[in-house]
Image: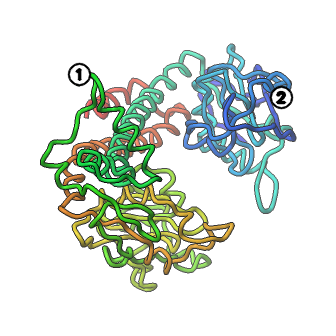
Amino acid sequence: MIFNLPKSWAALSIEEAMEAIIDYRGKTPKKSDSGIPLITAKIVKGGRLTPPTEFIPEENFDEWMVRGLPQVGDVVLTTEAPLGEVAQLDSANVALAQRIVTLRGNPSVVENDYLKYLLQSHSVQHQLEARASGSTVKGIKQSELRKVILPLPPLSEQRHVAGVLRALDDRININTQTNQTLEQMAQALFKSWFVDFDPVIDNALAIGNPIPEPLAKRAALRQALFAGDTQTQPRRLPEATRALFPDSFEQHPDLGWIPAGWMTMEANKIADVAIGKTPPRKESQWFSEQETGNYTWISIKDMGNSGPFILDSSEYLIPEAVETFNVRTIPEGAVLLSFKLTLGRVGMTTKVLTTNEAIAHFVNYEQGLNKEYLYCYLKQFNYGSLGSTSSIATAVNSKIIKSMPVLVPDNGLADIFCSQTKIWFEMLLLNSKEIETLSRMRDTLLPKLLSGNLQPPEVEAHIEEALEH
């Protein structure tokens, strides 16, 4: 690849620019439920690490990590399935899995902070793709990875560029963490009221009604919470709200013990449930990478990359595609649920959009329900109860989704839940929109800064303005 670089820049291969290249491909570690977090390819997404889901036993760390130990600041690069995802380590207490290469820049020629962004640039991603092999799953050999050329400005400029981009990432991370906390609060309240039935247990205990055996441990916990010193007791629900909950339970064939008097109804009886559609994939004219003038078209991957609110997609449908193939448009305020292959991803819409056929949407809520209640219900639903096959994610179909049981509380409790959590969901949406704005700004600035066509001082004022708003 030929680079038209400023005079002060250098073009070095990864082999020339790295102090260390750590590669654990070809080995499979023994995994455990806890221990040292394992950095796998599937948790490296969008320039950051998602929470680890796999671990290796602490006692196996030394015998596994014989090819090199990671350091804080090292950059990890996925080498296949997917190829080219990048993140930076903020802890050295991690183990490295297959399909991951860890890169540590030679400090005399490249800053690790800069390397993280450079590896995400079009010029480097294009080289990775060109040097990859494999017909079904593309991957890159270490020998080919070492040949990838890195365009490198002077170190002082690298630090400045990385600082600008990191300021955006830091704000995105803060908003993401805040949103995780807000959603945990909303889900915790929903679980207390509509899964653990804490107010119903409290009412039953208060008048001596029997507690079903499956709820006995929860009842004992509730008794312990409100025993002893009143100063240390958790705050009870206001009496007027608690009075809206029943004081006994009845058994349901699908959901087990539920509050007496509450109903369960099929999903298509509490909302209009419909499925998306995909135009013929071989006819590329129906799809676009441009948002303007087109319909946002949500995939399961898009849902995995978003929070509670679905704001954007990686692909769009032109209006003619929606009309020609009768693709359903989904209004603002709908709840989306993935039900094919990846089962149970849930989100809420903020504008008119479309989805593929692996996603169901719920609109026009009835029986006193609302999108916040249904969103939380679907997030906590036991999808294993929908079938008995070993592969439930492939067994579930649209008919099953439309007939799945939904718990319907009475006395307007779904609306009360909505009012209790309204401020949390409003903050979630504002933060999500800011994340989208800052992410787009970062993605726009990234190629310009890394090519030398735009200097950091030219953009810092715009970034400061964005961060203030």
Q: Which amino acid does label 2 sit on?
A: Trp
Mark 2 element type: helix
Q: Is residue 230 among what the camera can see?
A: yes
Point out which mark residue 257 bears. Answer: none
Mark 1 vs mark 2: which is more N-terminal? 2
Q: Which residue is drawn at 43% across and 86% down?
A: 324
**Residue 402 image offset from top left, x and y in percent:** 43, 77
Q: How crowded is mark 1: few (under 14 residues within 10 Å), some or many (20 or more)?
A: few
In the rendered image, residue 60, in percent from the top left (x then y), is placed at 81, 27
Residue at left 75%, top 30%?
A: 57
User: Is 128 positioned to the left or the right of 467 in the image?
Assistant: right
Residue at the spot of label 1: 231
Residue at 40% in and 77% down: 274
Marks 1 and 2, Cα distance to the nearest angstrom?
51 Å
The percent coordinates of residue 469 (x first, y second) are: 25, 35
Kindly identify which numbered label has been placed on residue 64. 2
- Give the residue type at disc 1: Gln
Check the image and report above or below for 72 versus 411: above
Rendered view: 381 above or below 129: below
